[in-house]
Structure formats: structure tokens, C-alpha cells
Image: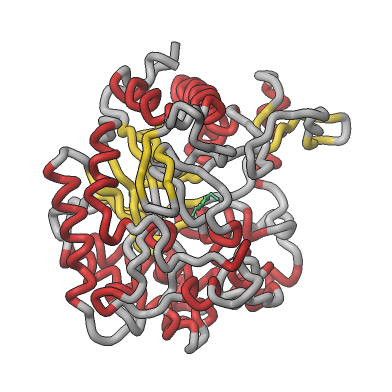
Amino acid sequence: MAFFPKDFVWGAASAAYQIEGGVRESGRGPSIWDTFSHIPGKVARDENGDVACDSYHRWAEDVAALKAMGLQGYRFSIAWPRIFPDGDGAINEAGFAYYDALVDALLENGIEPYVTLYHWDLPQALEDRGGWQNIATARAFGRYAAAVAEHFRGRVRHWFTINEIACVVGLGYGSGLHAPGLQLPLEGQFACWQHVLYAHCLAEQALHAAYAANRVGFASTGRLCYPVSENPQDIEAARRLTFGSPDDDWTFTHQMALDPLCLGQWPQQDVGPRLAACIAAVPREITEALAFGKPDMLGLNIYNAQPARMGEQGPEYVRRPTGYPRTALGWPVEPDSLDWGPYFIGQRYHLPVYITENGLSCNDKLYLDGKVHDADRIDFTARYLKALSKGIARGANVRGYFHWSLLDNFEWYSGYSERFGLYFLDYATGNRLPKDSSFWYARTVQANGANV
Ligand code: IFM
């Protein structure tokens, strides 16, 4: 039987561009995802977020869904271009109306808002001036955070500044698979990286200054490993591989962001010469801000991890056997990622952790009886929660779990083909339908996880 602390927060998560639609309403400016998704060939079937789940108009149904599951928290993001259509400059007060209604309805229903400030929808006007390559974007983010903090003072107390710096930089400015679709060399990517971290620091300062009770987090994703046994040697191997070699795919390591933010130093070990040169050249303005950038809590977006063990030559990855279980998106099903991931991260950074995303894409459909029988989602989530409870028993300081996602939505370059929701979206009508997993999740929340 799984065990979770009595004040554990059960929630679900979403992000503005993935669900809102209403991209031209109430003075919202264009974001890089509006631009990118309208370039033919960038998104599967050339889909875009113009309408998405239409949450801009149907938010009350989203709140009703959260309520029906008895959730205590909702993690959603604010679209920066709704508040600052040009990224900076004058505030668009009308852009707050939608979030005011949503936040008030959540509070009235006893659901705590967990607000992400940046889930990838950079105002296009800022990208036109260099986007995250330009330090001015970080300063603009600080002003945006200050405006939002002031507006929601006392109503929102839990914040995540940046969602997945790994994807912001690695996919947006590295592989080019995400907006703005650039493929910069390592040095260009690092420039973005340091500016995103700086943006976090400025936002954190603004949030704390606006309201002392604000709790500020940074939602990270990246490489994690778990040991194939409880043997201390295998555990050590998994830990070392989790935090080793940042030069190899460095944008997808947690420590390239969390070491400077939480430990006040950049990773030193195994950093190759080009990355070392970038680190040595970080401007003083950013270094000084990083010294005070330690978040109050960490968000971890965990979907899977790599099995590892201690081999004869040292730590090594373990190959998954043929036929290993995978989600519809082809991601390996690795429940132990929720056991060991928060544990290793917590041991290194000594901060409370929220699982800000975890879930899977399934080939969901309406059955003949008009319902969505997503047994895979129930099985996946039960296994992951069981493992999470093991990690908590092991000592991981995990305060909450937010399932990704509340409802099926726009899955970036995959468009609408991947269904991650607890609620099914009929894209022809915009109607939401609870999947079997949503009823199961409601029972799990009610039992505080004791049923898994
Ligand atoms: O949909 C995304 C989300 O926006 C960020 N984390 C991963 C999810 C699934 O791919």
C-alpha cells in the first residue's frame, strides 16, 4: 500500500498555449508559438494553438473538471503576451481578466493555483529583438513577473518561473524543433541559457518583494537515472550518471541549471572546453543575481529515466530488453523514475520538490459505449505513484503531484495527435469528457494515494 504525507497536494497541470486558444482576444500579442506553428511543416498536419481546447472561453468547464476529481491544486501558466503584448512596455490590463476569473473560481472551489510564468510562449516582439539571446528579454521577464505578482498579491502564493529550460533552449535554440526554431552553436545556446536563469532570478526577486508569503519554484526536466537494484554500488552508479558529463547533451541535465541556482556554482566536472569558456565568461550582473536565485522549491517534470548499474569499468546504462513497455509517444514506462529522481535531486539541492508534470500519451478514443476506457493511463499512474511513495519513504521531500495533463491539448510539434489528458477533448466540438482515469484519479485523491 502506498503512503503519502497528510498535506500532500494532488493536482493536474496545463499550459497557456496548449489549451487557451483565443489568441487574438483582449489585446493579446503574438507569441513565438503563434508564428512558428503557422510556418508550414513545423507542426504535424500544420496544426496550431489558435483554438486549442478553447479554455479561454471554456475555463469554467476546466474548473468543474478539477473539482469533479477533488483536486487541491491546479498548475497552469499565464501567457506573457496577454499581459505584455509587446513583451515589455505598457501592461495590457484586459489580459488579466481571463486569469482573474480563473484564479477566483479556483479559490472559490478550494483549489490552490500553482502558476507558471513562462511555459514557452515568448512574445514575438521580444524574439524580434533576439529573444533569449538578448539579456533585455530577462529584464523584461523580471518586469512581467513584477506586474503579475502585484496583480495577484495574496491570491496566488505558489509560482514556477520557468518551465523546462532544457526545452526552452535545447529545442527552441538548439535542435530547432520548438519555437523559435533556431539552431545555434553551443555558445549561442549558452547565451540563452544564462539569460533564462537570470530571468528566473529577477522574477523570484520580484515575487518575493511583492508578497513575502510567495513561494517560488523552478520547474526542471532532464536526464535522470535509477539503479537496477538496491545495491549501494548501483545506487551510486545511478547518481553519478544522473549528474555526470554535462557536456554531453548539457541542456538536458538538471545540474546545468540547478547547480548555479541552488548551489551557487556551475558544474565543474567533465565540462568540455567550449562550455567551460562560456561559464567563465558569464557576466557579473548575472553571476551576482544567481547568488540570490535559490528557489524556495523545485518543480520536477518526470516522465521516465534510464536504468543504471555499476559495471566493471564504472557506472553504466542498462539496455532495456526488446518489447519494453512504451507509451503511445514511444517513451519508456519507467515508474522507478519517480522513486529515485526526486530522491537524488533532493539530496543534492535540499529543497522541497513538487512533481509538476508526470503522465503519458495514450491512443485514447471513444468506445462504443461513449466512454473513454484508458486502462493504460490508470496502470501507468498507479505504478508511478507507488514508486513515488517508495521514494518518499526513502527520504524524498515531495510535497505534491500534478498529473500532466488536465485535458488533451496541443502537444507542440506533434499537434493534437498525442492525448495526455485525464479528460478527453472532442476537437470538433470542444467538448470535454472524463476518461476512466479521471474517476480513478478522483478515488486516489480521496484515499490520499492509499489505494495504489
Ligand atoms: O506537453 C508537454 C509540456 O508542455 C512540457 N512537458 C512535457 C509535456 C509532454 O510532452
Q: Report the residue at 22% width, 53% height from top.
A: 214
Q: Left or right: where does residue 215 sit relative to residue 418?
A: left
Q: From this view, report whether residue 108 is shown above or below residue 56.
A: above
Q: Quadrant of the N terminus?
A: top left
Hey, which residue is sitting farthest top in the picture? 1
Q: From this view, report whether residue 52 is shown above or below residue 420.
A: below
The x, y position of residue 53, in whole percent, is: 38, 55
The x, y position of residue 268, in whole percent, is: 65, 58
Q: How many marks?
A: 0
The x, y position of residue 252, in whole percent, is: 63, 55
Q: Report the residue at 61% width, 70% height from top.
A: 279
Q: Report the residue at 17% width, 66% height from top.
A: 97
* Residue nearest the viewer, comparing 366 with 350: 366
- The answer, for residue 192, to whether it is visible in the render is no
Hey, which residue is sitting farthest right in the picture? 312
* Residue nearest the viewer, comparing 289 with 228: 228
Q: Left or right: where does residue 151 sit relative to residue 41?
A: left
Q: Left or right: where does residue 346 sit relative to residue 209?
A: right
* Residue nearest the viewer, comparing 44 with 15: 44
* Residue nearest the viewer, comparing 208 with 283: 208
Q: Quadrant of the C terminus?
A: top left
Q: From this view, report whether residue 432 is shown above or below residue 182.
A: above
The x, y position of residue 162, in whole percent, is: 42, 60
Hey, which residue is sitting farthest front in the picture? 368
Q: From this view, report whether residue 109 is shown above or below residue 18.
A: above
Q: Left or right: where does residue 246 sit relative to residue 87?
A: right
Visual colour scheme: secondary structure
Q: Report the residue at 22% width, 63% height from top.
A: 98
- The answer, for residue 92, to whether it is visible in the render is yes
